[in-house]
Amino acid sequence: MRWIIAIGCGVALVVGAVWAMQGGTQTEGLPYNDAASVARGQALYAENCASCHGAALEGEDNWRQQKASGRMPAPPHDASGHTWHHSDDTLIAITTLGTAAVVGQGYESDMPGFGESLSDRDIREVLGFIKSTWPDEIIERHNSIGG
């Protein structure tokens, strides 16, 4: 369990540096209140994310336990998961670059980067769709994270 916490801390520290090195600056929030963006994000999620994270954002079974490969299963993106614990910038960086690139230090993940197959807008709309499914209190907590 300690290594999961260490990885989470590593993500938080590394993502800022990686994102800054790539010239990324995020100033607007995810479009979770825009019906057209959410609808596009839902379709993109179904095409690109649901095969691992589940059609209902439920993630893989036993998502907190390592697979035999040593990698972690795909987590849920609903309110039961930890997606909402990360800032918009972190979520965008992970989705764009892939978890291994963001965490670094030899970390291995099945989560690829989608930056070459999805536009920045596409990625923001997928994340906006995910956020639109969370209860209001989770959205408020996520909004308070900043960045």
Image (tube, rainbow, N blue to C red):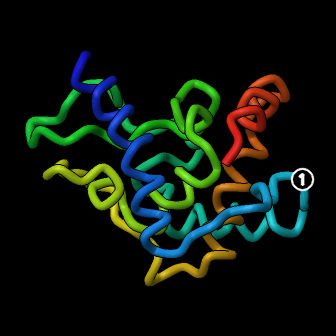
Quadrant in the rendering for residue 38: bottom right
Q: Is residue 118 above or below residue 39?
A: below
Residue at coordinates 56% horizontally, 49% vertically from top-left?
55
Please give the residue where the numbered disc 1 appears in the rendered image.
33
Q: Position of residue 52 (x, y in %)?
A: 40, 52
Residue at coordinates 67% horizontally, 68% vertically from top-left?
43
Q: Is residue 29 above or below residue 139?
A: below
Q: Is residue 31 above or below residue 40?
A: above
Left or right position of 67 against 132? left
Q: Quadrant of the N terminus?
A: top left
Pick the residue in front: 32 or 133. Answer: 32
Residue at coordinates 35% horizontally, 30% vertically from top-left?
63
Quadrant in the rendering for residue 71: top left
- Badge 1 marks a residue whose secondary structure is loop
Pick the residue in front: 115 or 19. Answer: 19
Residue at coordinates 9% horizontally, 36% vertically from top-left?
68
Left or right position of 110 against 88? left
Amino acid type at circle 1 is: Asn
Disc 1 crowd, CA 10 A, few/some/many (<14, 14-19, 20+): few
Left or right position of 52 against 105? right
Q: Position of residue 33 (x, y in %)?
A: 89, 53
> As drawn, which residue projects farthest toward the top?
1
